[in-house]
Image (cartoon, rainbow, N blue to C red):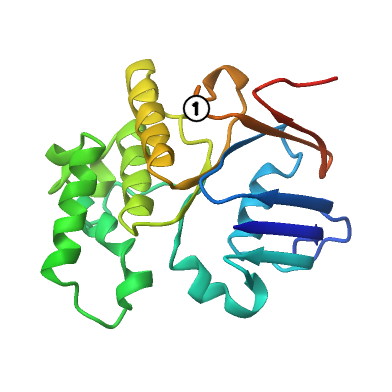
Amino acid sequence: MIKLKNVETIYEGERTPVIKNIKLEIKKGEFLTVIGPNGAGKTTLLETINGLLESKGEVIVFGKEIRKFGSEIRKNIGYVPQDFSCDSLTPFLVKDIVLMGRFGKIGVLKSPSEKDHEIVKKTLSFLGISELEKKPIGKLSGGQLQKVMIARALGKEPEILLLDEPFSNLDLNSHSDISEKISFLNEKGMTVIMVVHDISSIPERCKRIVMIDNGNIVNDAKEKVLGG
């Protein structure tokens, strides 16, 4: 489903690649977790797969080159970034934010259908945050906002889910609950690629861990066995 060959990504204005010589293949329905120290290139890897950064080498998703078909490919990718914030005066309601996740499929200039609104309700219910539906996004706690951003990604009904530190603002109960739901989606066939900083937070269902250091993949381990 995803193939990276000799991939190198450099941020605009920089000279040194953040990730380099990346070779990685991810099969449909796989659950992969990316770990590594701060600044190692974990987030850059996700953004490269999602076609958000210019890169060299081959980045093939759904059998198509991301540089040529990025907009089409992203219709089937749900992405939850690590850094997001909302001004307390932001007027959008939670249901509006989640509905925005569907615009990539329905088109920004098209009006959402009854089905789109129903998918929003089902997604909020799935994540256990239906009570937030009509709450202003700027009034949410960090943990609530994180769940809403996950809901926005899932509202797209993606085939691939990219998660960058999805548990960082969650308490222990919410962490466990979201972890189980991500595992459930993977069990149903969704391909999941997740970045975490704490190995103990990796869901049991994840059987493959890729370690990045200094922009390079230094270990690609299955069955959660690192090293050796």
Mark 1 surroundings: few (<14), some (14-19) or many (≥20) residues within 10 A: some
Please indicate, yes or no, whether residue 197 appears anywhere in the rendered image. Answer: yes
Task: Please say whether residue 93 is visible from this viewpoint.
Answer: no
Question: In this orientation, which residue lies closer to the viewer: 210 or 93?
Answer: 210
Counting labels gives 1
Identify the image quadrant of residue 17. Answer: bottom right
Residue 3 lies in quadrant: bottom right
Q: Is residue 159 left or right of residue 174?
A: right
Q: Is residue 124 above or below residue 220?
A: below
For image coordinates 64% across by 46% down, the residue present is 43
Q: Nearer the viewer, residue 75 or 149?
A: 75
Q: Is residue 10 left or right of residue 223?
A: right
Q: Is residue 74 above or below residue 182?
A: below
Q: Quadrant of the N terminus?
A: bottom right
Residue 204 placement (x, y as % from top left): 50, 22
Return the x and y of residue 163 as percentages of the image width and height: 51, 43
Secondary structure at numbered mark 1: loop
Residue name at image x 76 percent, y 39 percent: 40
| Place of residue 174 in the rendered image (x, y in percent of width and height, measured from the top left) | 33, 24
Residue 221 as seen in the image, left or right of residue 169: right
Task: Give the camera-side residue of 12 and 32.
Answer: 32
Quarter of the image with the C terminus is top right
Mark 1: amino acid: Arg
- In the image, residue 51 sits, relative to residue 221, either above or below, namely below
Residue at (72%, 68%) from the top-left corner? 54
- The residue singled out by tag 1 in the image is 205
Left or right side of 179 for 173: left
